[in-house]
Amino acid sequence: MTLIALPGYEELRERMGEGAEQDLLMSVGAALRANSTSGDAAGRIDDDRYGLVHTADLDIAQLESRISDLIRDADPNQEGLKVESATVEVDQENLSEEDIANGLIYTINRFKSLKGSDFTLKNLSTSISSLAKEAVESVQSFKATVAKAEFEVAFQPIIDTRTGVIHHYEALARFPASEGRSPYEQITFAEETGMIAEFDLAMAKKVIEWLNKTPRNSTVSVAVNVSGYSVGTLSYLAQLEEMLNENVWTRGRLMFEITESARMDDLDAANNFIRRLRNNGHEVCLDDFGGGAANFQ
């Protein structure tokens, strides 16, 4: 996969009219698709960034030159832009297609998030491949951590500020120190690579196991975080409901907090998720509402 950046695109956009920009985008998109695998494995990652999957024999320098010519022709000042690229190569040996796909998704997200005037792909060209390999290794490591439940749960009290009484405890994941990332980074990584629903289920299971060791007449309730990504995943809801039906005693003691780290685009699916949990006897909260991706809709 080759990642392409167009530094200075914002200035170029200001020089072009809307019609000229749309024509340029169509031309660049066509050039990338024509050189991609199956003619459709290319896309615009951000305003000034693209990516395409291609065969190993593609002449990247020639593709850069083609895009550069298209930009110069569209520029009223005929200045054009310098096209930069870096190619990600991942050895498929001992790696599943799922691991490779997750690794490339992670790389694309990292590529999209890099900002600043000092950013150039040439500076990253020697490390972009290692970044993809790092992502694949991280995917495998995280999957193993979730499968073996090799993480701890910390319980943070949520307190009513008017009375000082603890309303419930929020279950927070704590990963092994050897993982080298903060819990927030680990959760974000799981969301970016599509593994968050699997983790959310593992977290719910671990909290249920903890609650099961407390007296049945205990009034302690615990909230488990649910990513916005998981809310829209039908398989997650089905497995979660199966888990809850096997542990009906958790009603009134196990709550769910929908986190804002990911925006929920399908509000009907989110509403269905919340209603089904409530009908099952479980309260649903919004975690840190207003501090992340959610909006008042």
Image (tube, helix red, strand yellow):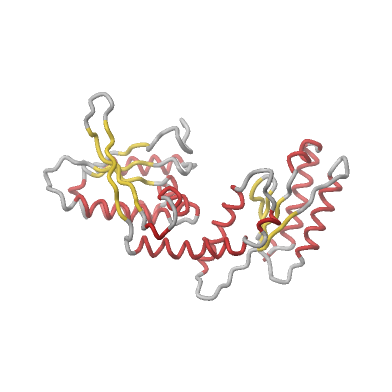
Total marks drawn?
0
Please state if 131 lies on the left or on the right of 163 as rendered: right
Which quadrant holds the N terminus?
bottom right
Q: Residue furthest top?
A: 162
- On the image, the x and y values in percent for residue 255 come to 28, 42
Which residue: 37% across, 36% down?
286
Q: Position of residue 96 (x, y in %)?
A: 50, 70
Image point (68%, 44%), residue name: 47
Residue that appears at 29% across and 48% down:
154
Q: Residue 14 location in percent, x, y?
A: 77, 36
**In this rendering, position of residue 149 left or right of residue 245:** right
- x, y percent for residue 234: 40, 52
**Which quadrant of the view contains residue 288?**
top left
Toward the bottom, the furthest residue is 93
Front-most of 165 and 254? 165
The answer to whether residue 163 is above or below residue 171 is above
Is residue 71 or residue 175 the one in the foreground?
175
**Viewer-side residue, 258 vs 30:** 258
Q: Is residue 187 above or below residue 161?
A: below
Q: Is residue 183 left or right of residue 117?
A: left
